[in-house]
Amino acid sequence: MIFNNKNNKRLPVNRKAKKAFSIYCSIIIAVILTACLSVTAFAAGNNQALTAVNNLSTFIFGLIRAIGLILLGFGIVQVGLSLKSHDPSQRANGFLTVAGGVVITFAKEILNLVTGS
């Protein structure tokens, strides 16, 4: 057996084959992750599934509200710094960030207004 053979060369692979292989690998990984991470939820009885969904919805909207408050605070700081440095583009970006933070903070209330519930 010869292990130190210096004449080993890789076979050339064209771009189409590389792209097809990467798509194939992505599909395989997605299928494996879907199979491994899927969990069956069993409801025990009277409206427990609905309660669990409502609790999850409350938790997710709480996270969204926290992100909105962070953006709102960042926007206020950005507007304050722009007023200090007399930078109109930073001021415009600050006001846009404040507006986005307000919309994200009150996303649940806006959704309730739109859906009428």
Image (cartoon, rainbow, N blue to C red):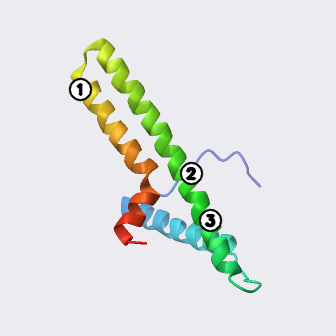
Q: Which residue is mark 1?
A: 89
Disc 3 residue type?
Leu
Mark 1, Cα crowd under 10 Å, few <14 / some 14-19 / many 20+, is few
- The residue that appears at 43% across and 37% down in the rendered structure is 72
Query: Where residue 63 is drawn, which disc sits there?
Result: 2
Q: Earlier in the sequence, mark 1 or mark 2?
A: 2
Decide: is 114 above or below 4.
below
Instruction: Work out whether residue 40 can be spotted.
Output: no
Q: Position of residue 79 (x, y in %)?
A: 34, 25
Q: Residue furthest bottom?
A: 45
Q: Which quarter of the rendering shows the N terminus?
A: bottom right
Q: Residue furthest top?
A: 85
Q: Which residue is mark 3?
A: 56
User: Which one is in front, 104 or 87?
Assistant: 104
Decide: is 96 above or below 47.
above
Mark 3 and mark 2 residues within 8 Å of each other at the beta carbon: no
Quarter of the figure with residue 32: bottom right
Q: Position of residue 9 (x, y in %)?
A: 54, 51
